Image (cartoon, grey):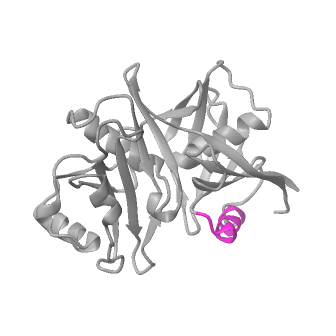
Amino acid sequence: MRHFKQVDVFTAEPYRGNPLAVVLDGAGLSDDEMQRFANWTNLSETTFVVPTTDPAADYRVRIFTTETELPFAGHPTLGTCHAWLEAGGEPKRAGTIIQECGVGLVTLRHTDRLAFAAPPLIRSGPVDDADLTETCAVLDIDPSAVMAAAWADNGPGWIAVELADAEAVLALEPDMGARPDYKIGVVGAYPMGNPAAIEVRALFKMGDGPGAEDPVTGSLNAALAQWLLGAGRLSSPYVASQGTVLGRAGKVYVEQADGEIWIGGDVVTCMVGEVDL
């Protein structure tokens, strides 16, 4: 039997964020065994803490969707770190945790909440007309409704679209079947004085699979922060709201400090037990 936790990420209120399954002692499991369990949990991601290969790391994590392994993802990074710390993990440096994963070493800091340093964008810049037309077909809007659009790809392949305001983002009724493959992040600003600066939605579809909306997305918010802060469209710090249309209450805390953009969020533990793998 192996120690197991199910946590809720980007929320301080259980069952209002993005769930994650964490197997805390994944040593010795084969790739097939990990993938089979991740498929069975039927969550967007399941993680396995395994022995490190880099002496600088505090722990190593492998991240699986229901179908494949990912080199990095945001909410699994925060959720796994929370579970590891809660289970008695002790970082080499107080207040700083080094996670080893498919993209290498990822730095997290632990203050009032956990936060990870946004990974570099591997593709940025404007979206061409053809890509924008396809993106708007999924969003079921006219291209004239788009205030700005850019590649915001830190691995998954996000195209970021800014609409007039948060109300326009919440009003979207996307046509998930309009295109066979896409990863779209949509953002719109709230009025001044709102607790959240922006509303975010993450839409994705891979091949012939059904389209879906992610409740709260760390990688997307990291990429949006790099785009919006870099373009001067937002200032640090700010809070992003996500998952509203799904009945969630996700909150992502973004801060630019020490030469990094930090993506933070609360994490709560919802289930603790053992799993037979």
Task: Tell me residue 224's x, y (percent).
Answer: 33, 44
Name the one closer to the observer, 240 or 119.
240
- Residue 172: image quadrant is bottom left
Task: Tell me residue 203's x, y (percent).
Answer: 38, 64
Name the one closer to the observer, 12 or 2.
12
Q: Which residues are magenta?
A: 33-43
Q: Quadrant of the C terminus?
A: bottom right
| Relative horizontal placement of residue 244, taking residue 114 as reference (left or right) | left
**Residue 121 visible in rendering:** no
38 is within the stretch colored magenta:
yes
Task: Tell me residue 243's x, y (percent).
Answer: 47, 57
| Relative horizontal placement of residue 181, taking residue 106 as reference (left or right) | left
Q: Residue at x 17, y 58 (%)?
A: 146
Q: Quadrant of the N terminus?
A: bottom right
State how many labels appear: 0
222 is within the stretch colored magenta:
no
Q: Residue at x 67, y 36 (%)?
A: 59
Q: Is residue 141 above or below residue 111?
A: below
Task: Tell me residue 39's x, y (percent).
Answer: 64, 70
**Residue 38 visible in rendering:** yes
| Relative horizontal placement of residue 213, taking residue 96 as reference (left or right) | left
Which residue of the protein is positioned furthest toward the front in this rendering? Answer: 193
Q: Is residue 50 above or below residue 16?
A: above
Assign the magenta stretch its main secondary structure.
helix
